[in-house]
Structure formats: structure tokens, C-alpha cells
Image (cartoon, helix red, strand yellow):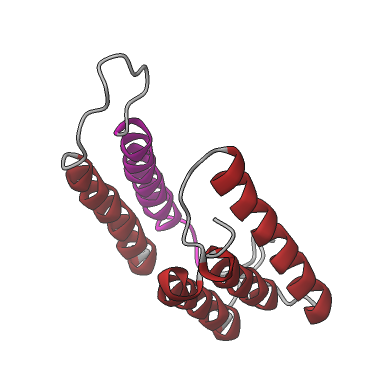
Amino acid sequence: MAKPELILAAAVVALGVFLLLGVTRIGFGAGYDRIGPRFFPYAVAAGLIVLGGWLAVGAWLAAGRPKNLSDGSAPAAALNRGSLGYLCLALLLNLALLERAGFVIACSAQFWLVARAFHSQRPLRDAIVAVLLSTAVYFAFSQLLGLSLPAGIFESLS
């Protein structure tokens, strides 16, 4: 049996169930709302549960296949710990900087680190694109849509 794959599948299902339980704490929207504030979290939770089930079925079916590569299939890729480290750092740094430094700085750092994780060879270009994209998203959401994002360096402009 493909034990690591089944553990991953169970973790994805557990995350979906955890999210599903958390959605019940979200209040109902106004009575005239077609789609209330619970809709998308429910959809994400359901998607995670379905994805976890799909992964479990795939792991279960893969368990019956022979382990040698005589069938011409490619060997499984090795875990790239450096890329995984960059991705984890990007997420943690975004969480740490979002309220303190603001949306633009936190998301720019996250974008740049994710580009590193995908082995981009142009760090300066990545930094410029990260700042421009994060700034554009910040202004689109805060000024055009009226949603509040952590301002950070744009505190005085809001």
C-alpha cells in the first residue's frame, strides 16, 4: 500500500473537514444575498474533501502496480527541499509581515520567494514584477473595490 500518499490524502480530507467545521461559525449574509459569505468557504472545503478522496483512490490503485520501472514509466521525482523551504518561508513571511508592513511589502516578498522556489534566474526582474503586481492589486482592491487591505507604506494615502 502507498502509505505516504494515503497519509497525504487523509491530511487533505482532514483539512477540508476542519475548514467545513470553521465555516459554520461564519454568520449568514443579508437576506437578499444570492451568494452569502459561507458559499466560497463551503466550496473550498468540499473541494478539499473531494480532492483528498481522489488522492486516496489514486494511492489505493497505485498500490497494486508493480514497483519496477519495466513498464516504461518515469521514476517519481525526488523532493526538492530547497524549493519547499522557499515556499514555506514565503508563506510564513507573508503571515508575519501582512499586518506589520502591509499588503504590498508582504505580497512582494512572497512573490519573490516563490519565484526563487521555481528556480527563476532573474531576481531583479522578479522583484520589480512583485512590487508592481502587488501595488496594482492593492490599489484595485482598496480603491476600486473599496475593500480594506493592510496599508503599510500606503497608510497615509488611504
To which quarter of the image does residue 49 belong?
top left
Spot occupied by residue 134 in the image (x, y as percentages of width and height) = 65, 60
In the picture as drawn, the residue positioned furthest to the front comes out as 156
To which quarter of the image does residue 158 belong?
bottom right
Spot occupied by residue 41 in the image (x, y as percentages of width and height) = 33, 40
Near-viewer residue (25 or 57)? 25
Residue at image point 60% right, 79% down = 83
Which quarter of the figure is the N terminus placed in?
A: bottom left
Residue at image point 52% right, 83% down = 85
**Res 102 visible:** yes
Residue at image point 33% right, 60% down = 6
Name the main secondary structure of what is drawn in magenta: helix
Query: In the figure, is residue 155 to the left or right of 44?
Result: right
In the picture as drawn, the residue positioned furthest to the top comes out as 32
Spot occupied by residue 104 in the image (x, y as percentages of width and height) = 59, 66
Query: In the figure, is residue 152 to the left or right of 58?
Result: right
Looking at the picture, does residue 30 appear above or below residue 137?
A: above
Residue at image point 58% right, 64% down = 154
In the picture as drawn, the residue positioned furthest to the bottom comes out as 82
Spot occupied by residue 129 in the image (x, y as percentages of width and height) = 77, 65
**Res 76 visible:** no
Near-viewer residue (11 or 151)? 151
Query: In the figure, is residue 23 to the left or right of 32?
Result: left
What count of labels does the image hold? 0
Queried whether the magenta region covers residue 5, the answer comes back as: no
Queried whether the magenta region covers residue 40, the answer comes back as: yes
Q: Which residues lie in the magenta part? A: 38-67
Near-viewer residue (152 or 64)? 152
